[in-house]
Amino acid sequence: MLWGFFILRRNVVTFVIGGARSGKSGFALQKASAAAGSKAYIATAQALDDEMRERIARHQQERTDAWTTIEEPLNLAASLTSARGAHSVLLVDCLTLWVSNLLVSEIGNIEERTDEFIAALEGSNGCAVYVVANEVGLGIVPDNLLARRFRDLAGALNQKVAAVAGEVFLVTAGIPLRIK
């Protein structure tokens, strides 16, 4: 019976998804902060304007000194792989911004990048990984090609993360609901 427990603990991914300003990042931070071990926050946001700089500053103030911040807007799989060697708790916030960054950077095959990220998640090897993303599939079909591509890429990535996650929480109005 104990052997099975260790196998289940090998890949510990918690996926937190919700709408914009739903409380998902705060909930993920709370859960990750309660986990034992060295902690790293992998931030995908880029401070491209004053409003985003303020948002980033607020998120930084929410974290204690126990957190190491890694800023990674594009190469998320490599950053995750590298960070798990030095830390036992990782919080990736957020996949939705990462997909947006990839789209505007015209970096190439985004599906390949997302598959690399999923492989990195699957290889977490005992590292507790908390992943945050926006739920983008609850609205209307966007009226332009770029917005539809973004929605489709983000939605497909969310499904892949949910499939490999041991736990999935939907957060709405600050209330988390465990859905897996």
Image (cartoon, rainbow, N blue to C red):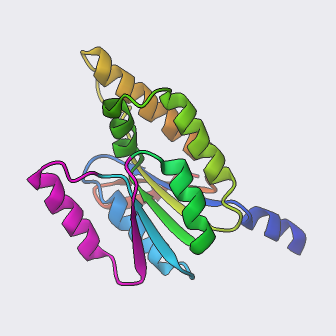
Up-down relation of residue 132 to residue 156 (above or below): below
On the rendered image, what quadrant is the N terminus found in?
bottom right
Whether 56 is drawn above or below 30: the answer is above
Whether 103 is drawn above or below 6: the answer is above
Residue 91 horizontal side relative to residue 137, left or right: right
Say left or right for 144 vs 72.
left
Front position in the image: 45 or 25: 45
Residue 52: x and y in percent read 17, 53
Q: Quadrant of residue 159?
A: top right
For the residue pair 114 and 154, the one nearer the viewer reads as: 114
Give the magenta range: 46-73
Q: Residue 17 in the image: state x and y as whole percent.
A: 42, 50
- The x, y position of residue 130, in whole percent, is 51, 61
Residue at the left extreme? 50
User: At which x and y percent is residue 99?
Assistant: 39, 38
- Picture quadrant of residue 74: top left
Which residue is at 74% across, 64% downward?
10
Given residues 64 and 33, the one toward you in this image is 64
Asked whether residue 1 is in view, the answer is no
- Count every numbered label the image shows and give the total: 0
Residue 52 magenta: yes
Left or right relative to 47: residue 50:
left
Q: In the image, is residue 61 part of the stretch drawn in magenta?
A: yes
**Residue at the image position 40 percent from the left and 54 percent from the top:** 72
Q: Residue at x 51, y 66 (%)?
A: 90
Instruction: Note whether residue 38 is visible.
Output: yes
Q: Which residue appears at 63% of the width and 68% of the height?
A: 127
User: Up-down: is 59 above or below 109?
Assistant: below
